Image (cartoon, helix red, strand yellow):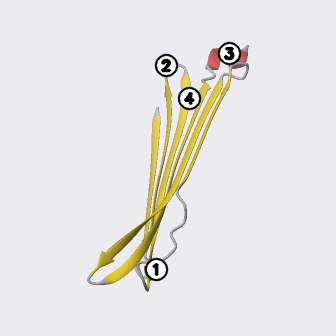
Amino acid sequence: MRDLLFKNLTSPSRGRKIIASSEVADKEGVHSVVRRHFSYIVKPVLAPQVVKPQPYLYVLKERNTKLKREHFFCKVKGSVLAVNQGNFYLILFVHTLSVDLTASVKLGQIAG
């Protein structure tokens, strides 16, 4: 079994876009949940000397053999300075990836 969910939220007037997806699957005794999230904001700036935020990377990996669970999380933040028709824009973005893996519970194990 596999369930997919997609969200695409766009706001051109605010210069914002959010794309999110979630996937839930049960395969070969493993229940997996994968979540992806990407968003960006476009802001007009006056000069190319604007102070850009520092890039950011965060990675977390957990493994618990007693609970039969693995978790992976990654988050990336950054920014880009762009020029369009002589106007400067600061594009701020963030991307996250979360993966959860657990052992599937079979119906025979529940009854006992």
Specify the quadrant of the image occupied by residue 4.
top left
Label 3 vs label 2: CA separation?
A: 15 Å
Mark 2 lies on residue: 28
Q: Is residue 9 above or below residue 65?
A: below
Mark 3 lies on residue: 109
Tell me which numbered mark, 3 or 2, is placed earlier along the sequence: 2
Q: Nearer the viewer, residue 25 or 95?
A: 95
Q: Callout 3: helix, strand or loop?
A: helix
**Where does residue 99 sit, x and y in percent of width and height?**
55, 37
Label 4 vs label 2: CA separation?
A: 9 Å
Tell me which numbered mark, 4 or 1, is placed earlier along the sequence: 1
Mark 1 lies on residue: 14
Residue under the image location 52 percent in, 73 percent down: 51
Mark 4 lies on residue: 31
Whether residue 11 is visible here, answered yes or no, is no
Q: Residues within 10 Å of mark 1 (few under 14, many from 20)?
A: few
Q: Callout 4: helix, strand or loop?
A: strand
Q: Is residue 78 left or right of residue 81?
A: right
Between circles 1 and 3, the one closer to the viewer is 1
Q: Quadrant of the C terminus?
A: top right
- The answer to whether the residue labelled 4 contacts the one labelled 1, judged by CB atoms less than 8 Å apart, is no
Q: Nearer the viewer, residue 35 or 85?
A: 85
Tell me which numbered mark, 4 or 3, is placed earlier along the sequence: 4
